[in-house]
Image (cartoon, grey):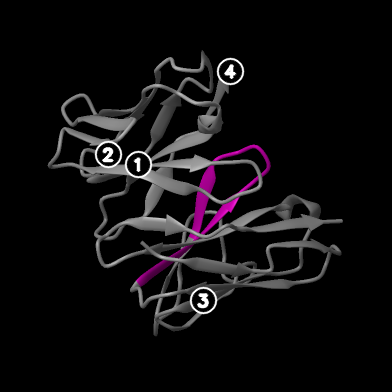
């Protein structure tokens, strides 16, 4: 398995500001993913973060809005830029272990006011 | 791209009964099918997964079956307990070489004592 830590766990943000979410894994992993879960909804993939290269974004998500960093094999950040109330969601970090199993962190619960 | 449908959206059972949640997928190249349990205020917890070369997998009270021909897979929980109450998500990999997951819409399971 994998132990995934996310910071912050919760935050209330002012519209127009940006927030960076950190994800730390307890072991080296090749693939890290960022998902969004809007209130009462399912999970949607934002992007895949590879170490040493630019993140790959899914349709509907752009780098200017959700810049991602992946400086090493155990850490990644997701920034939510110029936030609006529609960005109020749970942002989830996910990793694929060497056994090709997918685990999730506890999420970062953002409310934009 | 992959599309995953999940039924039912809500499921109420009495403690000790069995619960079954069903999912269908569209991409015949999908090869990884995990199930996650999400309790209120927490991130998704992997409870069981199955790969396309296996038809059934069990772990104590939980089992998953996969029918590749029909492109559907199901979660079976026996002897349900109140602590099984949560939202359950099925997912399927997109089959593009790494485990990029597409999720179902979720099933809210309520187990009454």
Chain of the residue where label 2 is placed in the rendered structure: B
Magenta-colored span: A31-46
Badge 4: how crowded within 10 Å, few (<14), some, or many (20+)? Answer: few
Q: Which residue is mark 2?
A: B27
Tell me what residue is drawn at x 73 percent, y 53 percent. Answer: A88
SS of the residue under disc 2: loop
Going from the N terminus, do you reach mark 1 or mark 4 first? 1
Q: Which residue is mark 4?
A: B113
Tell me what residue is drawn at x 86 percent, y 64 percent. Answer: A14
Is there a contact, CB below 8 Å, between mark 1 and mark 2?
yes
In this view of the protein, can residue A27 be seen by the observer?
yes
Magenta span: chief secondary structure: strand
Going from the N terminus, do you reach mark 2 or mark 4 first? 2
Q: Which residue is mark 1?
A: B2
- Specify the quadrant that holds the C terminus of chain B: top right
Of B81 and A73, nearer the camera is B81
Chain of the residue where label 4 is placed in the rendered structure: B
- Specify the quadrant that holds the N terminus of chain B: top left
SS of the residue under disc 4: loop
Going from the N terminus, do you reach mark 1 or mark 2 first? 1
Q: Is residue B65 left or right of residue A60?
A: left
Mark carried by residue A76: 3
Is there a contact, CB below 8 Å, between mark 2 and mark 4?
no
In this view of the protein, can residue B1 be seen by the observer?
no
């Amino acid at each position: 398995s994998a132990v995934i830590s996310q910071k912050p766990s919760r935050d209330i943000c002012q519209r127009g500001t940006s927030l960076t979410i950190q994800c730390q894994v307890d072991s080296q992993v090749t693939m890290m993913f960022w998902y969004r879960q809007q209130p009462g909804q399912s999970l949607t993939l934002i992007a895949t973060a590879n170490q040493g290269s630019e993140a790959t974004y899914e349709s509907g998500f752009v780098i200017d809005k959700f810049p991602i960093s992946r400086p090493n094999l155990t850490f990644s950040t997701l920034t939510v830029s110029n936030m609006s109330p529609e960005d109020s969601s749970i942002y989830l970090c996910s990793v694929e272990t060497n056994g090709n199993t997918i685990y999730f962190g506890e999420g970062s619960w953002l409310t934009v006011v | 791209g992959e599309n995953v449908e999940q039924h039912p959206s809500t499921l109420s059972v009495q403690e000790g009964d069995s619960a079954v949640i069903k999912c269908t997928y569209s991409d015949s190249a999908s090869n990884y099918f995990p199930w996650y349990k999400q309790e209120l205020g927490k991130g998704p917890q992997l409870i069981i997964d199955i790969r396309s070369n296996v038809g059934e997998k069990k772990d104590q009270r939980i089992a998953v079956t996969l029918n590749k021909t029909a492109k559907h897979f199901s979660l079976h929980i026996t002897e349900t307990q109140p602590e099984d109450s949560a939202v359950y998500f099925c997912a399927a990999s997109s089959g593009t070489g790494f485990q990029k997951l597409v999720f179902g819409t979720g099933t809210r399971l309520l187990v009454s004592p």
